[in-house]
Image (cartoon, rainbow, N blue to C red):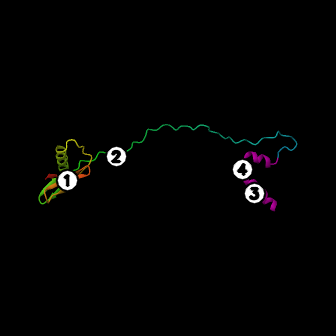
Amino acid sequence: MAAKNEAVKTEAVVDTPAAEEKTAPKKDAGKKAPAKKPAAKKTEIVTEKEEAPKKAPAKKTVKNDVQPDTTVTVQFQGKDIVTAQVVEAAKKAFAEANPDVEIKTIDVYVKPDENVAYYAVNGEGSGDYKVEL
């Protein structure tokens, strides 16, 4: 009975036509049939990559690098002080007093209680560097 189980297992595992020819009994035992070679599996070797059809590039959302118009206004004891105007006044006052010096950096310190803005140009400040508000 063990031999039957093995045969069943072998037949269940075999699934290719070439393998069936080897295990199946021959119909004509008297005639000699030419030996058949097992069918070769077709394999395709691709040596070059096939290019996919070119697609139109997806539209990209571009962030706007332009800064929005901004106004900063300091309100103190009934006064409105627009900071951009204070910076421009400080640049103008320094340029008039020092026409030969290039302004690389400017720092402005607004003191609304004194009604004055002090500034430092290129890291240097002075008590004379002030703008009346």
State the residue position of label 1: 126
Q: Which residue is mark 4?
A: 15
Label 1 Cα crowd, 10 Å radius (few <14 / some 14-19 / many 20+): few
Quarter of the view holding residue 4: bottom right
How far apart are the alpha carbons under marks 2 and 4? 61 Å
In space, the residues marked 4 and 3 are separated at their CA atoms by: 12 Å
Q: Does the residue at mark 2 contact the one at mark 4 (Cβ under 8 Å)?
A: no
Residue 2 location, quadrant: bottom right
Query: Which of the two discs, 2 and 4, labels the residue nearer the N terminus?
Result: 4
* Mark 3, secondary structure of its residue: helix
- Return the residue nearer the eye: 30 or 61: 61
- Residue denoted by label 2: 63
> Dot 4: within a 10 Å radius of its alpha carbon, few (fewer than 14), some, or many (20 or more) residues?
few
Do the CB atoms of the residues marked 2 and 3 lie less than 8 Å apart?
Answer: no
Task: Say which residue appears at 75% left-offset and 57% top-offset.
Answer: 9
As measured in the structure, the alpha-carbon distance from the residue carrying label 2 to the one carrying label 3 is 67 Å
The residue at the point 76 percent across, 43 percent down is 38
Please give the residue where the numbered disc 3 appears in the rendered image. 9
- Kind of residue at disc 2: Lys
Q: Position of residue 15 (x, y in %)?
A: 72, 50
